[in-house]
Image (tube, rainbow, N blue to C red):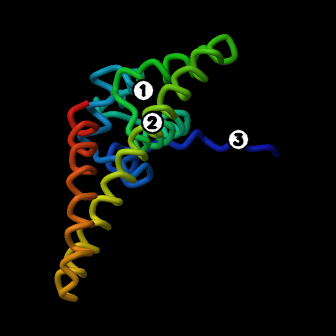
Amino acid sequence: MTTHAEPRSYTIRETAALTGLPASTLRYYEQVGVIPPISRGASSGHRVYGEADLDQLMSVSCLAATGMGLDDMRHYMANARRGAAAAAGQRELLEQQQRHLTVEAERLALRQRYVDLKIAYWQAVEDGDAGRADEISARARAMAEELRAVTDH
């Protein structure tokens, strides 16, 4: 006798625990159209998540972790439902996010270099090396201009 397991369903609380997304975020992603409307229990009217919903939410969670904005996540998830026909669009969205992350990484690296210079400056001050402190201070001032320029954009 072959038995088929009933599809597993999850409450919003269980889904939040499994995806790591707060229940408020799950409702918000549905409200703004990042994910399609979730089925409701016939008697309770509460959201009932299935395995496919969990898969979508895990994808959304990963996209959010990259810093992708809501509009792009919405497009990405809509494209995902279209399958291979949307492959070029998916690639373009991800390439755009990749460029964004590259710029963000460059800005972070600049901030790290600035902090490194400030540490070196204070080490020179602590060591009583005024000449080195002056040289580092000049480099830090030049870098501060660069830092302000990338922060303004």
Choose top left, top right, bottom left or bottom right for residue 5.
top right
- Give the CA distance from mark 3 to mark 2: 30 Å
Please give left or right for residue 141 compared with residue 7 in the image.
left
Locate residue 114: give its quadrant: bottom left
Residue picked out by circle 2: 60
Identify the image quadrant of the C terminus. top left
Say which residue appears at 35% left-offset and 29% top-offset: 69
Q: For the point 65% across and 18% down, which residue is it?
A: 87
Locate residue 87 relative to residue 19 in the image: left or right: right
In what element is the residue under mark 1?
A: helix
Of labels 3 and 2, the one closer to you: 2
Please name the residue that numbered disc 1 is placed on: 73
Q: Which mark, residue 4?
A: 3
Local crowd size for mark 1, using a 10 Å CA cut-off: few (<14), some (14–19), many (≥20): many
| Real-space CA distance between mark 2 and mark 1, rounded to the nearest whole angstrom | 7 Å
Extreme right residue here? Answer: 1
Determine the residue located farthest toward the front in the rendered image.
Answer: 131
Q: Nearer the viewer, residue 101 or 129?
A: 129
Q: Are marks 2 and 1 in contact (CB under 8 Å)?
A: yes
In three-dimensional space, the C-alpha distance between marks 1 and 3, rounded to whole angstroms, equals 35 Å
Kind of residue at disc 2: Val
Q: Which secondary structure, mark 3?
A: loop
**From the viewer's perspective, is 35 left or right of 89?**
left
